Image: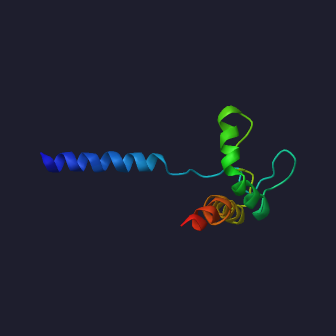
Amino acid sequence: MKKIAVAGLILIVLLLLAGCAPGPNTVEKTPNPQGKIAGFWKGLWHGFISPVTFIISLFTKNVRIYEVHNNGGWYNFGFVLGAGLFLQGGILGSRKARRR
């Protein structure tokens, strides 16, 4: 009985994790209505301002955290790097390091 409960719990956890898996970006490498494709520098900027953008996106339907019209890997790299600079290694992370 205990093995069945553990197996059931593992199955539920796996299904929940599978539900969080990202899907394909069908508009990647296609221009937005203004004819632009976001690259590394836009990704860096969007990652850096992501905490503020997230809060705004909760109250606005027109604001999103992530630009879907991007060039792929370089935009993703810039986004992660920008978010990391703000959240850990940059502004907030340096203040925590000084306190210790």
Q: Residue furthest front?
A: 99
Toward the viewer: 59 or 3? 59
Residue 87 % position (x, y):
62, 58
Q: How is the image coloured?
A: rainbow
Q: Quadrant of residue 92?
A: bottom right
Find residue 66 and report its horizontal and vertical position in percent: 69, 50
Quadrant of the image containing the N terminus: top left
Residue 58 on image: x %, y % = 65, 36
Looking at the image, residue 38 sits to the left or right of residue 17; the answer is right
**In the displayed structure, does residue 73 sit left or right of residue 14?**
right
In the displayed structure, does residue 16 sit left or right of residue 48? left
The residue at 70%/43% (across/down) is 64
Q: Residue furthest left?
A: 1
Residue found at x 66% / y 44%: 54
Q: Residue at horizontal 73%, vertical 59%?
A: 43
Name the residue located 40 percent from the left edge and 45 percent from the top edge.
16
Furthest residue to the right?
34
Q: In this orientation, which residue lies closer to the viewer: 29 or 16?
A: 16
Q: Quadrant of residue 80?
A: bottom right
Most foreground residue, 3 or 91:
91
How many marks can you see?
A: 0
Percent from the top left, x then y, of residue 69? Answer: 75, 52
